[in-house]
Image: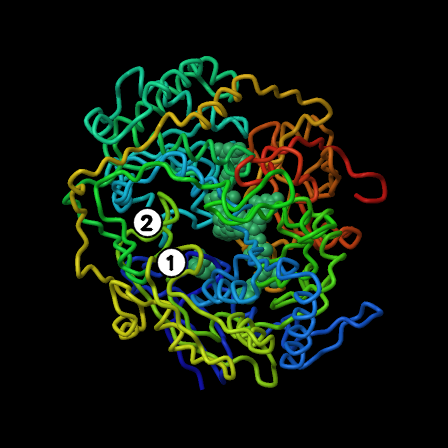
Amino acid sequence: MSRTVPSICRVCMNFCPVDVEIADGVVQSVSGDRTNPIYRGYTCVKGRTQAARYTSPARLLHSLERRPDGTFVPIPTAEAIGAIAEKLTGIVDRFGPRAVALFGGTYMAMDSPVNLSMIDAFMTAVGSPLTFTTSTIDQPGKPLAKGFHGAWMAPSQAFDDPDVALLVGNNPFVSHQGRNGAPADFFRGLAARGGRLIVIDPRRTETAKRATLHLQPRPGEDATLLAGMLRVVLAEELGDAEFVAENVTGVDALREAVAPFTPDLVAERAGVPAEDVVAAARIFAGAGKGYAAAGTGPNMSAKGTLVEYLLLCLDTLCGHWMRAGDRVRNALSLVPAVIQPDKAQALSPFPAYGYGEQLRVRGLTMTAAGLPTAAMADEILLPGDGQVRAVVSLGGNPAACVPDQLKMVEALRSLDLLVQVDIQMSPTAALADYVIATTLPFEMPGTNLMVDFLPLYANGVGLPESYAHYTPAIVDPPAGSDVIEQWRLLHRLAGRMGLQLELYPALGEVIHIEGSVPLVPDMSRDPDIDELLEHIHTGSRIPLAEIRRHPRGALFPDPPVHVKPRDPGWEGRLEVGNAVMMADLQAELTAADDPGDYPFRLVSRRLMHVMNAPTYAVPAGRSRHNPAFLHSGDLAGLGIEAGDVVEIRSDRAAILAVAEADDTVRPGTVSLSHSFGDLPGHDEDVRALGSNPGRLIADDGVFDRFSGQPRMSNVPVAVGPAPRGRR
Ligand SMILES: Nc1nc2c(c(=O)[nH]1)N[C@H]1C(S)=C(S)[C@@H](COP(=O)(O)OP(=O)(O)OC[C@H]3O[C@@H](n4cnc5c(=O)[nH]c(N)nc54)[C@H](O)[C@@H]3O)O[C@H]1N2
Ligand SMILES: Nc1nc2c(c(=O)[nH]1)N[C@H]1C(S)=C(S)[C@@H](COP(=O)(O)OP(=O)(O)OC[C@H]3O[C@@H](n4cnc5c(=O)[nH]c(N)nc54)[C@H](O)[C@@H]3O)O[C@H]1N2
Ligand code: SF4
Ligand SMILES: [Mo]
């Protein structure tokens, strides 16, 4: 018998509401929910084809243990947990708690709202500060820049309804990182209102094609470009003088720092017309309400903090922040209401790095974006006090996603214990001592807490209106399987290690809520997931019980949230002339760019049909590899035909990739998606597996000095025909 039930797609962070057809307890098909007021039926190819994720023979249904000869044998998950608990306890006893690290990937943050809090509870109980996540190899510049600039204590202006949006290296049409919902609806609405869209991207992306103005610069020149725009805004007095006078400091320092960035200099450096730099500034500052946002590209250029800082300066000079009395249309629904930004005042700059855990390499420390993941391999390989001996990896694929793949794989191989929690035999799983088979999203209850939280993370992301959605588990795991939720695994592990967990509401370390009371679960039995969910959503503006009454999700405009006036005597100011940032900007002026032996620049990108690493469930008819997109002029110049295998070489390594002609790519750049391929030495068949650009990156070469994020885009490379016999 077949039935159709509503749920939430959790393949990517858009969290689309879907209708799921189920027959005999098995997911058959997935389609968009047309009745939904925000998404209006939107889904993408990954979401619509996800039934295959549930039934494929490649799905891991049992946990595995590695034998001494390197092969894997199935092991009951309960038995594996016992063995892992014993080994972890032994490692902690011998080497201390810092010898245990945890790696959390995107599916750790996404599949259950309980996971983040559970991870913090687990690592706190173990006593280790070494939790690494993908946050610091993604867009760590966002939280870091807020530290240098300060934060407006109300949301950015007109996210629901902008007159202008500036998107720098961000392609929401494919990535869905932007306004959550249906990307086309947002851009259509913007155009219909006469709103302006400015896109800065070395590729003429799906988003850039909709832009009023597209600047197609050399990669890695965003700081130069933004400095040029700031110079125009200041010189032509285009900003919001009243807002600046009341709330901002450092304008003179900024004016001085951007003075050398004339339109001509910027044009020459970035390879764009000088008049476009001026036009971008005039459009952005003159259009009215709006916001600026960057995506992964500029954050990965090893200057992410500076770029994000300059974007905040641009918004601040233009007064793009909500004022007293404004209605917050996308007031948080699920995140504790006490942290809703709702006051028209500035929080002065605060330390965003340089505190907490000191890593043993490159002077890196804890940051507002978390612990620098680019130091994880060194923390494993570097002998001495505090050396990491065990890694528990959840919902991510560190052997593929962390830059400097060669070093990371060497590090993971050297561990005393590697536990990989996964749905398939990923490259990391292949290196693990234990592979724990885990549940898929429709087998678990969930909420859209992560999406609700996004506006707290940065400008230009999240939902346009207050909207919340809860889904129960809608199918059971396959009959005869032995899979476990990530949160339950951690709880049981802690129980077997004799540890007591304390679970805080919301998103663990990601959000600190003064005075919140932890849940102290009974460690001798599995906690009830409903109780955990209730606790995680403690203090939300909309009680979870109310959200649960709307199985298709709903808008929750009431109680309304209005921005309050500034507190009497409040003296906080936003800082646009931070000395550290201004010094980094000056350094840009003299940064030499000698192509040497590496005339091309490798730039990052996303592909519609996969979420980062490909899974076994790549939609039918889509390529399993990640093509190297090159301009047809470049292909001709290199004597390479589309479809040929090329070699891409950096000063670190070489990879093979299948060339594809694409004239949306700026000449001189290679646009290649990440996390494909297999382990080094196992991915010769590039047409079947794709390749890993992370192998071309050194984690200690060029990097953002605050987050440690290596240069993952704008990587100097040479491109040529693959060696004979490898084409
Ligand atoms: N060179 C380069 N490197 C990059 C990037 C880049 O642009 N360029 N991007 C970086 C960024 S922004 C990020 S966030 C990281 C992403 O890095 P990861 O977090 O590692 O990425 P994913 O591929 O999303 O997750 C991978 C793991 O989740 C498993 N998985 C797939 N579906 C599910 C599921 O439904 N549930 C569970 N539990 N597991 C599942 C997969 O088998 C795989 O092992 O990569 C980073 N690395
Ligand atoms: N379909 C799909 N969706 C995804 C993912 C996926 O793998 N597939 N991954 C998810 C994840 S983990 C994340 S973090 C988000 C990321 O979301 P986005 O940041 O929107 O990701 P991209 O689509 O890669 O867009 C980055 C853009 O930066 C450009 N770029 C590269 N280098 C530079 C540079 O130096 N300067 C400028 N200005 N631009 C540059 C690239 O050409 C590209 O168009 O997407 C998420 N959504
Ligand atoms: S955009 Fe696609 S993968 Fe992401 S939540 Fe929506 S349907 Fe799922
Ligand atoms: Mo990401």
Task: Say which amino acid is labelled 2.
Answer: Asp
Apparent side of residue 59 relative to residue 529 in the rendered image (left or right): right
Task: Say which amino acid is labelled 1.
Answer: Tyr
Q: Secondary structure at mark 1?
A: loop
Above or below, 443 relative to 126: below
Residue, disc 2:
185
Do the numbered discs 1 and 2 sit on residues whose CB atoms are within 8 Å? Answer: yes
Residue at figure coordinates x 55%, y 49% from the top left: 357
Disc number for residue 42: 1
Mark 1 within 8 Å of ligand 3, using the beta carbon: yes
Apparent side of residue 365 relative to residue 648 in the rendered image (left or right): left
The front one of 451 and 194 is: 451
Q: Indicate the position of residue 358 as horizontal and vertical percent values.
A: 57, 45
**Quadrant of the snapshot with the N terminus:** bottom left
Q: Does the rendering let one see residue 610?
A: no
Image-quadrant location for residue 630: top right
